């Protein structure tokens, strides 16, 4: 940590303003030290050797030697934090894809304090390194590159940046970037900083608004399900699902963020679209079991099969999966006489959906169709979440005491796919407010209640004549 005190000031003490700026830099250094201490347990948990731990936390990034293989192995895509920061900011071998992958996935092996500190270390070029940097490009080019990286970081990880780091970035722009002549870049950083703060405030307000309890009109919802054209119903469900899907933050998919239920702004919409699937499943079963007469129950079952077929056609795979789960709820599967009453056409459609969403071979059928589907579409989000969990659990965090960046790249490939799907998710269905509003908050019974109703409608060992 002592290397943090060796930051070389980019100017001479010539006036009062400079002295004040220098004092601010010293204050900033102590703030960074607190962040590093906060992150020490995270780094230590990766179980590096003492020597590698020192390379991660102790050495200034400028002490990294790219020609020494001890702390990196590019062939295996492994290295220390310093080696990856060096690669991230390389002037002669800049890779935008690597930059986006690294910035997006870096919370898996370092926190915001460490990342910002390392970028500042790299920004402050030591005197004995200036000649080396200028021979490749220029110190100015390196510093502008680092500012661009910070700008991208702000746009991706505004959830993870607290007020202390916001203050440090603002101080960095005011006391370092602009005084060194990078006025245009400094102004762009200020804009990115303001936008990050605004996004952070906005998502908190959105979550509070979204989470408010809504009055659910059970009778109105059931009437819409019974009377609305199936295609229109599918379209209106998809309009609402699109709004959720397009708000999913990619970083909320990473590192099990979506498993955290407490004030999880980062993964809020990931959680909501996952909950939506479960809600649709329970709603499906509830609507079927709301019909006390057998013939009505069969008709409702067949309407949901038709709805599933329509959702598949318009490629809303998440809601399709929700209905499929609902049709396979234990309370529905036991309805012997309801199932026997389904038409041959409905049975054939149900079998096609079962084949499409068969989980064997890791949803092989679904993945095959998804790979050839043209936008717009809404994916079955749980499949991606399962893939990310498999990557996390199936790939070690470290290899020979070095960070395993292959793990990050595998995760990032999934995020890129989701990102494209979000951007291209532009359905042109006209919105019907009356139907759409009713489908936002779906009424349902829980599994225990559903099973009790199911037993009442078709008791165990009942014969056909006993069922109304």
Image (cartoon, rainbow, N blue to C red):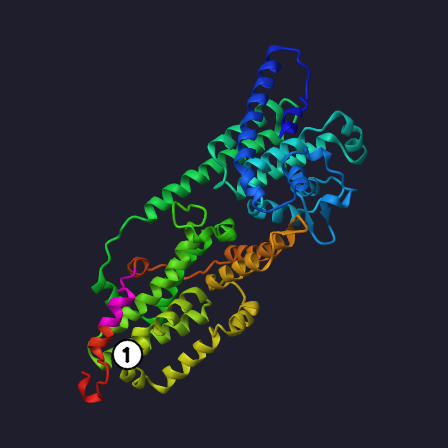
Quadrant of the drawing holding the C terminus: bottom left
| Furthest-front residue in this view | 50
Looking at the image, which is closer to me, 76 or 94? 76
Q: Quadrant of residue 216?
A: bottom left
Q: Is residue 133 left or right of residue 154?
A: right
Residue holding disc 1 = 299
Residue 217 in view of the camera: yes
Q: Is residue 34 left or right of residue 332?
A: right
Q: Is 329 colored magenta in this rendering?
A: no
Looking at the image, which is closer to me, 432 or 311? 311
**Percent x, y for residue 425?**
49, 58
Residue 378 in view of the camera: no
**What residue lies at 40% left-to-right and 79% top-to-bottom?**
350
Q: Is residue 414 above or below residue 73?
A: below
**Percent x, y for residue 111?**
55, 40
Q: Is 450 colored magenta in this rendering?
A: yes
Q: Quadrant of residue 222?
A: bottom left
Q: Which residues are magenta?
A: 442-452
**Percent x, y for residue 17?**
59, 14
| Furthest-top residue in this view | 15
Quadrant of the drawing holding the N terminus: top right
Mark 1 element type: helix
**Percent x, y for residue 199?**
45, 40
Q: Is residue 295 above or below residue 85?
A: below
**What residue lies at 73% left-to-right and 49% top-to-bottom?**
73
Q: Is residue 27 above or below residue 339?
A: above
Mark 1 nearby-residue class (10 Å; few <14, some 14–19, many ≥20): some
**What residue lies at 55% left-to-right and 22% top-to-bottom?**
27
């Amino acid at each position: 940590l002592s290397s943090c005190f060796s930051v070389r000031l980019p100017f001479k003490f010539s006036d009062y303003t400079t002295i004040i700026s220098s004092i601010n830099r010293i204050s900033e250094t102590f703030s960074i030290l607190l962040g590093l201490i906060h992150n020490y347990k995270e780094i230590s948990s990766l179980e590096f050797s003492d020597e590698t731990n020192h390379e991660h936390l102790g050495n200034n990034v400028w002490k990294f030697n790219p020609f020494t293989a001890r702390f990196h192995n590019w062939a295996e895509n492994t290295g220390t934090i310093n080696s990856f920061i060096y690669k991230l900011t390389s002037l002669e071998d800049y890779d935008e894809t690597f930059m986006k992958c690294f910035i997006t996935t870096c919370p898996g092996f370092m926190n915001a304090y460490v990342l910002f500190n390392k970028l500042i270390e790299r920004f402050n070029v030591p005197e004995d390194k200036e000649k080396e940097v200028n021979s490749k490009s220029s110190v100015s080019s390196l510093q502008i590159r680092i500012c661009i990286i910070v700008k991208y970081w702000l746009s991706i990880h505004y959830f993870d940046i607290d007020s202390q780091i916001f203050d440090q970035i603002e101080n960095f722009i005011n006391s370092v970037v602009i005084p060194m002549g990078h006025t245009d870049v400094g102004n762009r950083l200020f804009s990115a900083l303001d936008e990050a703060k605004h996004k952070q405030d906005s998502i908190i307000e959105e979550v509070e608004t979204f989470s408010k309890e809504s009055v659910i009109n059970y009778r109105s919802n059931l009437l819409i399900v019974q009377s609305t054209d199936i295609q229109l119903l599918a379209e209106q469900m998809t309009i609402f699902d699109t709004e959720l899907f397009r708000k999913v933050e990619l970083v909320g998919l990473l590192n099990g963020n979506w498993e955290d239920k407490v004030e999880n702004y980062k993964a809020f919409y990931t959680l909501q679209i996952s909950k939506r699937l479960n809600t649709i499943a329970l709603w499906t079963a509830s609507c079927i079991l709301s019909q006390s007469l057998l013939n009505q129950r069969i008709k409702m079952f067949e309407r949901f099969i038709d709805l599933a077929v329509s959702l598949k056609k318009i490629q809303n795979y998440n809601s399709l999966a929700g209905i499929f789960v609902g049709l396979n709820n234990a309370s529905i599967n036991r309805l012997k006489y309801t199932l026997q009453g389904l038409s041959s056409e409905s049975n054939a459609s149900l079998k096609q959906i079962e084949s499409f969403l068969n989980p064997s071979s890791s949803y092989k059928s679904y993945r095959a169709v998804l790979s050839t589907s043209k936008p717009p579409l809404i994916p079955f989000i749980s499949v991606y979440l399962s893939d990310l969990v498999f990557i996390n659990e199936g790939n070690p965090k470290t290899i020979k005491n070095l960070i395993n960046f292959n793990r990050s790249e595998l995760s990032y490939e999934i995020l890129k796919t989701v990102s494209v799907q979000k951007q291209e998710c532009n359905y042109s269905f006209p919105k019907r407010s009356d139907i759409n509003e009713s489908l936002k908050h779906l009424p349902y019974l829980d599994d225990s209640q559903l099973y009790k109703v199911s037993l009442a409608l078709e008791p165990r060992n009942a014969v056909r004549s006993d069922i109304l």
